[in-house]
Image: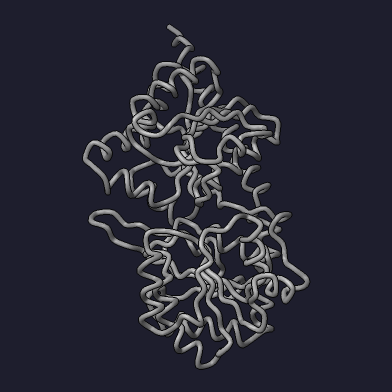
Amino acid sequence: MKLLVFSSGFPPLDGGIEIFVYNVCRQLAGRGHRVSVLTGSYEGDREFDMGQKIIIHRQGHAPAFSSLFTLFRTLYLSLTERPDMLFLGHFGSTHLFGAVLAKKLLGIPYVILVHGSDVNAYLHGFTWLDGLISSVVLKNANAVIANSKATKKLVEGNDYPLDRIYIVNPGTDIKELSPCENVEAVKERFNLTKKRILLSVSRLVKRKGHANVIKALPKVIDKVPDLLYVISGAGEEEACLKALVREMNLDDYVKFAGRVNEKEKLSYYQGCDAFIMPSFERKNGSMTDYEGFGIVYIEANACGKPVIAGRSGGVKDAVIDGVTGILVSPENLDEISDAVIRLLSDHEYARKLGENGRKRVERELNWNVAGEKVEDILKRTIAGHLIKIAAKKISPIA
């Protein structure tokens, strides 16, 4: 297959959507398909692009990366590269309209990978024009791939045919992310010895639930006095979270690690005793923002760690309650603190959940499995599109 992929975000950006799209592209390229990506230009992208098996077309930020420019660039690449399919790495409106035109004018089918909040934002959260154009983008898609059951249900609710919606959960790299034999050595490297480490890794935004974890800590500290809550990441809520820690006199129990590289992130996963991110659904006008899946949960599981997650959005696809982690009501502080206390006190239970999580990642939540599923969907969608075209060309018998 020859694929042209559009994704406004792409590595070196490290968000969940960027990670998902990149690893699907990497898997498809590794299976012998020609993968060409149209994306934005970001700091460090030249170094990232070197040695990739993927062809990457970078274009600058606004106004160069405006909708009109992207539309023409999509059509130009569709004409010059003649892909068998366009693969849209996320949902959108005007900047994806080039895919609609490529289908209408050039007969190139397209598939959209959707993540949850992107669908809500464009269909219901932004301007009326975004709602109108994004509904056209959705209506004309040959197939939609959802990252979880919750996201699939969201697409269903917008009148898209059920038989063209597929679920492919994100994965993780089971070779790069793995359990560590000597956890104490990892803790020593970060000067965290003799501490019970509770870890969060994510952007610092409200719906990730960091504030509720901090508010739940006093009850935990009564039972686990050697606790240290490590928060890795950066974002708009950082100042508010630090102020909350000071207000609650928890400076000795909370460490802000900031943005970390992949090697440091692995060490934090391996060195922690439990992972937590009690994400919740957040209303913003007519739009609901929520966790579409939560790759960080399975990254922690890949390192053999038990996880605590908020019972919301698509998280139930990532975490099996009582098997690979504990699901809590994300705004119930008692449920959060009780779950943390159990995992940090009942070592055998925590070990079992982490072990189950690792086995599940090896079996079904890795990039090889995700790549195989996406490849199969794309092949079948292209075949179905060609059959429809052939059928239209057959003249009726008089």
Q: Position of residue 133 (x, y in %)?
A: 29, 34
Residue furthest out toward the right: 181
Q: Quadrant of residue 213?
A: bottom left
In this view, 194 is above or below 3: below
Q: Position of residue 170 (x, y in %)?
A: 57, 51
At horizontal 46% and vertical 17% (from top left) the residue drawn is: 76
At horizontal 46% and vertical 80% (from top left) the residue drawn is: 251
Q: Quadrant of the N terminus?
A: top right
In this view, 310 is above or below 117: below
At horizontal 47% and vertical 41% (from top left) the residue drawn is: 9
Q: Nearer the viewer, residue 139 or 93?
A: 93
Residue furthest out toward the bottom: 222
Residue 352 visible in image:
yes
Residue 164 visible in image:
no
Q: Is residue 192 left or right of residue 340?
A: right
In this view, 18 is above or below 250: above
Q: How is the image coloured?
A: one colour
At horizontal 66% and vertical 64% (from top left) the residue drawn is: 267
Q: Is residue 292 left or right of residue 159?
A: right
Q: Position of residue 334 (x, y in %)?
A: 42, 85
Q: Quadrant of the C terminus?
A: top left
Q: Quadrant of residue 378?
A: top right
